[in-house]
Image (cartoon, rainbow, N blue to C red):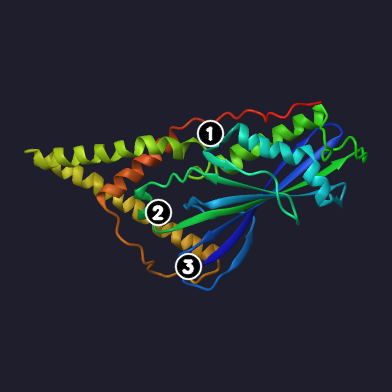
Amino acid sequence: MATFEYSSKLRAADSNTVINLTTKHCLIYGQSKSAAKKSHKSHFPPNLQVFPAPSIVFSFSAVLNRKPVPVNVLFKSQLTQIFVDFLRANEQKLGLTFVSNLYGKSSPKVNVVTNNNRQPVHDSIPVRVLLRTVHLQYSVTTKSESSDVNLFSTRLSLPYRSLADNLLKRFVTFHLVKKYPLVFGALGQQLDIEAPLFLILFQNIKEMAKRSTDPTFRSRVKQIFNAMKKQHQKSFISASTALNAYLNIDPDPKPDIPPITNEAAFCLSMEQLFLKGLRRTLFKASLLLLE
């Protein structure tokens, strides 16, 4: 099993404060034949399908004007609680079935469980990785060092709250939902409804071709199915090669990629079209009230 991490960054600022959010994403690849490895990267290998681990853990750390923020301060800060409340306020849109309270000794953590939306056709994808943890580090530079008026206070002022909500919405939209469409967001939930229809559509097309007396039509259907299979097979090989290179594993010149069926190729193609047609989800702010 191989473990790898990559990082991403976001920034928000006003006239008095700059927030840099660095997130470290930890993923596991359970089909590697090599010894366990850990790799730190600033980018993500292409063509990979990412699925949720049984539970996903978000953890937090922070630096204020280059000084580490104590764990007990983070636990009490409204900034950390806003993250938890944001997940709960958008639980359905994110496809979450459980969001824990904050816990942990070395750093605040929150555990989430997603709707395990993995369809049976996903078993045909030979190169899969699981998202296991995401660590969020806030690095804040501010003109005020007062413990009563900074981003890690127990109550946030409206300007700080606006900064925090802006950063959080962008993180969830672009670094979670867009990056992991089969983990977070509406895709998995809608696929639960649509996927059975893909199979019915495939069976109807197959039956039409079987009964048709037009050889041109039968040949065309066969060509389309073969083209779909070749496209997915090529994508699987590309993903395997890219991941091996990413993890510094000697790439196999002939990756052991099992053949894909017409049914699986059709359903995966329909899933890709479905994903492209989704609109961006609009999230609502957390429900904490300012006092």
**Count of numbered labels shown in the rendering:** 3
Amino acid type at mark 3: Ser
Residue 203 percent coordinates (x, y)? 21, 41
Q: Nearer the viewer, residue 58 or 128?
A: 58
Q: In the figure, 102 relative to 162: above or below?
A: below
User: Where, quadrant-wise, is the C terminus in this rendering?
Assistant: top right
Disc ID at residue 32:
3
User: Contact, CB < 8 Å: mark 1 with mark 3?
Assistant: no
- Residue 44 visible here: no
Amino acid type at mark 1: Gln
Disc ID at residue 235:
2
Residue 123 percent coordinates (x, y)? 37, 54
Say which label, 3 or 2, has the lower sequence index: 3
Say which label, 2 or 1, has the lower sequence index: 1
Relative horizontal placement of residue 203, taking residue 82 as reference (left or right): left
What distance separates the C-alpha of mark 3 from that of mark 2? 18 Å
The image quadrant of residue 234 is bottom left
Disc ID at residue 92:
1
The structure residue drawn at horizontal position 50% and vertical position 65%, both measured from the top left corner, is 244
